[in-house]
Image: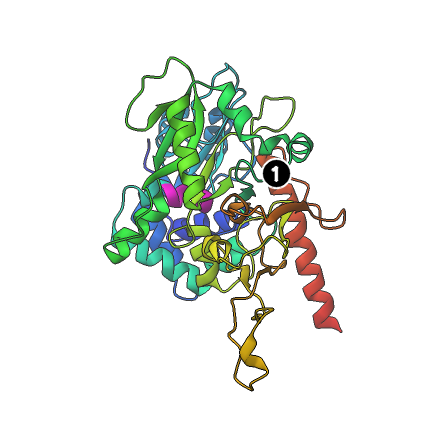
Amino acid sequence: MNTPVRHDDAYERLADALDALPHGFARTASGVEIKLIKMAFTEEEVWLAGQLTRFPETAAAIAKRVGRDEAEVTATLESLIPRRLVRVDWPGMTAPGLAPTLAGVKRYRLGPFLVGWYEANMRLLDREFAQLFEQFVVEGGGERIFAPRPGVLGVVPVRGSLKPEYIEREPHLDIDAHFQRHERFLVVPCVCKREIEVLHGESCRKPMKRCGFVGLPPQTPLGETVLDREEASTLLTRLEEMGHVHLAFYGFTMSAESPQFVGTCNCCSCCCGIFHGQKLAGVPEGAQKSNYRAVIDPEPCTACGACIQRCPVDAISEGPKRVPWAVPSVSAGTTPELLPGKSVVDRDKCIGCGVCMIGCTEDAIVMEPVSVEEWFHVPSSMAEWEDMRLQNLAAGKQRAARQLES
């Protein structure tokens, strides 16, 4: 590629372009976001990516607009796709990161930081990158990424936690149907768990290989990260039993007539970037909640505490202590023995993952749908998700402006 004219503000321009995306990429006082970009990309890559927006364009259109050779522009754009700074919009794409399955006009757009080029680079880079990321989250990047609604990833209740009629209403929750549609599945190591290990030298004892479960063509060779249907389903069941939360991709199947489940991160609260980042940023919500909330029936509840331990967001706690019905020593003036209180759910904290329900041996927990007013319309494409978030961001700015005026 002809070396572009050097601009001192090439990195600033890309940072601003990334922040203009609905996903967000906050500008900080320290400029730590610029350090992240410089660690991940060359100046030539930064210059070209900074010319892109969220609106897809052909390589020919981009080359003409920036005054560069089309073949060289195409080569640079293609090289940035695996590192997710550039995303491709091509008919037939079924999930993020997969090669297109149908012919069509290939269009390129700027890819977001998270979920996007952060994950791609965290798999390649070192402790410094992880440290810069945490600094970025604390300095304001976390609030810009995690706080706006809809969240960057959405909760899909674990299998066995929802009634069949609930799944029929929201087909993107049908994980079993996803397993029936495919014979091969891509399952990759968790980048969040890798970050924790890079930063601290160790992480939790839960499996490293646990994210993706994206359907692949049946002819895909089996391997360490490509599992057959039985292997993938068995692994997902094991992860559910261990208490992992499904945080699924938005976008679903672009070429389908209706939204479908296409894959998921499987997250533990100790390593997950969404849960961990939410805490670092000090924001009330990270993952987009499902349309269901856990409800505990006190009658069958034995106060065993299993649901408290399994809840990833500390939404379940022990209720008031209780006294046994028959305590002979009470009349003698001695203090009666207190027994553990039955579990109670903080509905505002509950994210509707269903992890507590499938771990309850007494069938004391059910998942109930939220009210019509609370119901979240799950976007059927990434474009719809972006439009929803931009509308909410604009509405938030208007509310802030009115508060200042008053």
Comparing 70 with 397, the one in front is 397
- In the picture, measured across the screen, residue 147 lies left or right of residue 292, that is left
Comparing 116 with 212, the one in front is 212
Q: Position of residue 246 (x, y in %)?
A: 49, 41
User: Can you identify the residue that label 1 sits on?
Assistant: 162
Secondary-structure class at tag 1: loop
Q: Is residue 77 visible?
A: no
Q: Position of residue 347 (x, y in %)?
A: 63, 58
Looking at the rendered image, the quarter that the N terminus falls into is top left
Q: Amino acid at mark 1?
A: Leu
User: Residue at the location (61% across, 38% down)?
Assistant: 162
User: Residue at the location (67% across, 48% down)?
Assistant: 391
Q: Looking at the image, how many numbered discs can be counted on the residues?
A: 1
Dominant secondary structure (helix, strand or loop) of the stretch shown in magenta: helix
Magenta span: 113-119
Residue 116 painted magenta: yes
Residue 15 painted magenta: no
View extreme (left): residue: 201
Q: Quadrant of residue 242?
A: top left
User: Residue at the location (57% across, 55% down)?
Assistant: 301
User: Residue at the location (76% across, 46% down)?
Assistant: 372
Q: Residues within 10 Å of mark 1 (few under 14, many from 20)?
A: many
Q: Quadrant of residue 327?
A: bottom right
